Image (cartoon, coloured by chain):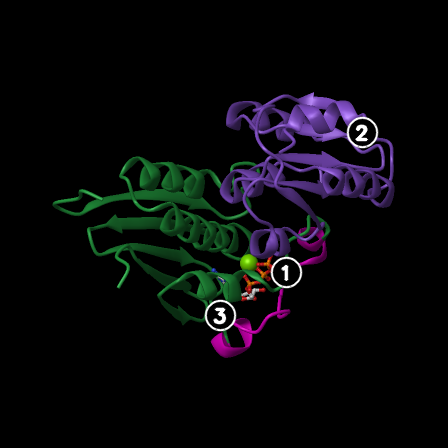
Chain colours: A green, B purple
Amino acid sequence: MKIKDSIEGCFQLMGGDFTNAGTASSELKSILSKLGVSQEVVRRAAIAAFEAEMNVIIHAVAGTMHYVVSSEEVRITLTDMGPGIQDIELAMQEGYSTAPDWVREMGWGAGMGLPNIKKNADRFKIDSVMGEGTTLEIVIYTRKD
Amino acid sequence: MLKVNDIIEKIGLDIRVSGDMYKHVTGCYISDLLSDVMAHSKDGELWITLQTHPNIVAVAVIKGLSCIVITNGRLPEPDTVKKAESENITILTTPKTTFETAGLLYNLLRSE
Ligand SMILES: Nc1ncnc2c1ncn2[C@@H]1O[C@H](COP(=O)(O)OP(=O)(O)OP(=O)(O)O)[C@@H](O)[C@H]1O
Ligand SMILES: [Mg+2]
C-alpha cells in the first residue's frame, strides 16, 4: 500500500433509515480497495463498519462514521446521538439485544453485531453516556507483523 | 467451479435481478438472521433466505456473496430490487422451500 499522508472522510447516518443502510460501509469498502489496502483488511473493516452503521440505524437517532486511513492502520469512529448503552459488558455478550420486535422480524437483533465488530478489530473501544449517545472506535492494522 | 448462471439452469430458479452471473459459487450459507450471515458466511457463497427487504443487498455487498436466493415463493421488495440493480447483486427466487432448495444445491455442489 502506498499512502504517504493519511486519507480521511466522513458519512452521515440517519437512525431508522433502513432503506439506505449499508451505503456508508459499502462506500468505505470500495475506498479502501482503491487505496490498495490488503483484501483481508478491507474485508474486516467493511464487516465492522457495517455492523456499527446498522447499530446507529437500529438503536440511535443520528450519527456519523469517520474514517482515517494511514500506512499503519484503518481507524473508523462512529459517533451517535441516541439512548446510549447502559451496561457495555452486557451489550458485548452474544445474544443480548434490546431491538424491538419489528426490527427482529427483519432479521436484526440477534445480539451478534458488537461481538463481531470486536472479532474483526485489532483495537475496539466503546464510550457511552446514557441519554446522550455512543462512540465506537475501531482500529484495524494494515501492516502484518 | 460452478457459476451463478450454472446454478440457475441446473436447479431452476427465477431471476429477479441479474447481477454478475459469472461469479463463482464457492458454497452456500442459510440464515434469516442478518448478523449471523455477517459473522458466518464466506466470500462467494450463495445465500438462501426468507428476508426480502433492502438490507439483504447490503449484506451481500459487504460479504462478497455470489447471489441471494429467496425461497417459499416470496419476492424481493421493490426497494430491494432497485438496490440490487445499482449494486449489481443477483437476486433469485423459487416457490420451493428452503429445505428443498438446499437439498438440490447440496447435491449439485457436491457432485462438482
Ligand atoms: N449505537 C448504539 N446506541 C445504543 N445502543 C446500542 C448501540 N449499539 C448497540 N447498542 C445496544 O447493544 C445491544 C447489542 O448490540 P449488538 O449489535 O451486539 O446486537 P443487536 O444490534 O441488538 O443485534 P444484531 O447486531 O445481531 O442485529 C443492542 O441491542 C443495544 O441495546
Ligand atoms: Mg447490531
Measure the C-alpha gap from mark 3 to mark 2: 46 Å
Identity, as a three-letter code, of the amino acid under mark 2: Ile
- The x and y percentages for residue B81 are 64, 26
Viewed as shown, does residue A141 lie left or right of B76?
A: left
Q: Provide the residue designation for mark 1.
A: A99
Viewed as shown, does residue A6 lie left or right of B64?
A: left
Measure the C-alpha gap from mark 2 to mark 1: 37 Å
Residue B28 badge: none
Identity, as a three-letter code, of the amino acid under mark 1: Ala
Q: Provide the residue designation for mark 2.
A: B11
Label 1: state its secondary structure: loop
The answer to if A96 sits in the magenta stretch is: yes
Question: In the image shown, does A103 or B27 lie closer to the viewer?
Answer: B27
Query: In front: mark 2 or mark 1?
Result: 2
Residue A85 badge: 3
Crowdedness of circle 3 by 10 Å Cα count: few (<14), some, many (20+)? Answer: some
Chain letter for mark 2: B
The answer to if A4 sits in the magenta stretch is: no
Sequence-wise first label, 1 or 3: 3
Query: In front: mark 3 or mark 2?
Result: 2
Crowdedness of circle 2 by 10 Å Cα count: few (<14), some, many (20+)? Answer: few
Label 2: state its secondary structure: helix
